[in-house]
Amino acid sequence: MPYINVRGVEHYYEWMRKPSISQQKPVMVFIHGWAGSARYWRSTAAALSEQFDCLLYDLRGFGRSRGKPAAVAQASEAVIESHSPQQESEAARELTYELEEYAHDLAALLDELKIQRAYIHAHSMGASVGTLFINRYSDRVEKAILTCSGIFEYDEKAFAAFYKFGGYVVKFRPKWLEKIPFVDRMFMARFLHSSIPAQERRAFLQDFLIADYDAALGTIFTSVSKAAAELMPQEFAWIAQPTLIISGEYDKIIPAEMGRQAAALNDKVEFVVIPNTAHFPMLEDASTYLRRVREFLQIDTPEAQVV
């Protein structure tokens, strides 16, 4: 499997592309959501690989990517033996789980692969990372597609309950869970309105079970927080590149109205809802999702080139 060192951390990545006799195709980068991996973007990337060289990667601490630099991991092991708070603090400062840090990770990944500009195609928490990347590195973005994203209001009691529940879920993830019959259906029930293939459901469960503890817990606190609730409306308002927000009609995780409100902040941002889908419209109704994406990108047919 291909790995690349990004800011001292080994990241998994893969290309999905088809040979072209025409000029070099533009790059589209896919960013997954919380506790997921690049695996669930493969079918979407395959469908767009006629027009784009599709780059998929696992965010730091998720999927097949490491959670921290090798040097920090070694320091953490030393801390276990020496119990030195100073060593632990120095190790922890190397990288944080702020979403802006993940945007910088993406910039470093593109640098390593010598990619100057790209299209951004991101989902859920990854869409927040993508939004921050668009605004921090605007000269490197052509267009963006943000799926299941939006703005939310801060609610202290609701957030506190979410953190408590999230911490419990992250802490208690026995590996034997995936061996229980139909557990993948139960695990994905809250995320879906329409069915998806069994192998996709199992892959989501597997990715959740292997996610790095610190990364999974850390990004819960940084992506759903008072600071994020105050920051993200500004970020959506600042977007300067043509951007499409796609929401699932019945999404319980990030309701469509949140996406609608985000798009209303900026005339550069278009908004569409995919009927009869929830948090994974690209899998629940792939044909409608791809049609909307192609319309936004001005691709007439699967065989056509970007105008």
Image: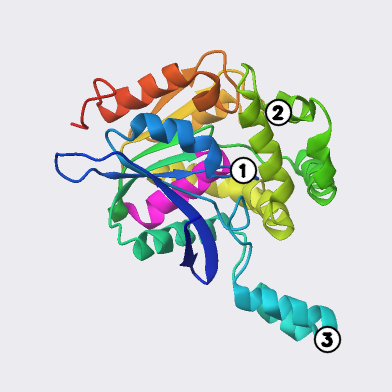
Which amino acid type corresponds to the residue marked 1 in the rendered image? Gly
Does any portion of residue 182 appear in the rendered image? yes
Q: Nearer the viewer, residue 41 or 274?
A: 41
Q: Nearer the viewer, residue 127 or 33?
A: 33
3 and 2 marks in contact (CB < 8 Å): no
Tell me how far mark 1 sits from mark 3, CA to CA. Answer: 34 Å
Q: Residue furthest left?
A: 22
On whether residue 44 falls in the magenta region, the answer is no
Tell me how far mark 3 sits from mark 2, CA to CA. Answer: 42 Å
1 and 3 marks in contact (CB < 8 Å): no
Residue 184 in which image quadrant:
top right
Tell me how far mark 1 sits from mark 2, CA to CA. Answer: 12 Å
Q: Position of residue 228 (x, y in %)?
A: 60, 49
Residue 270 in which image quadrant:
top left
Q: Nearer the viewer, residue 4 or 264?
A: 4
Q: Sequence order check: which comes first, mark 3 or mark 2?
A: 3
Residue that badge 3 annotates: 82
Q: Position of residue 16 (x, y in %)?
A: 38, 42
Residue that badge 2 annotates: 188
Q: Residue furthest top?
A: 276
Start and end of the magenta stretch? Answer: 123-138
Q: Sequence order check: which comes first, mark 1 or mark 2?
A: 1
Which amino acid type corresponds to the residue marked 3 in the rendered image? Ser
Q: Main secondary structure of the magenta part?
A: helix
Q: Residue at x 54, y 40 (%)?
A: 39
| Above or below, 112 relative to 216 | below
Q: Residues within 10 Å of mark 3 (few under 14, many from 20)?
A: few
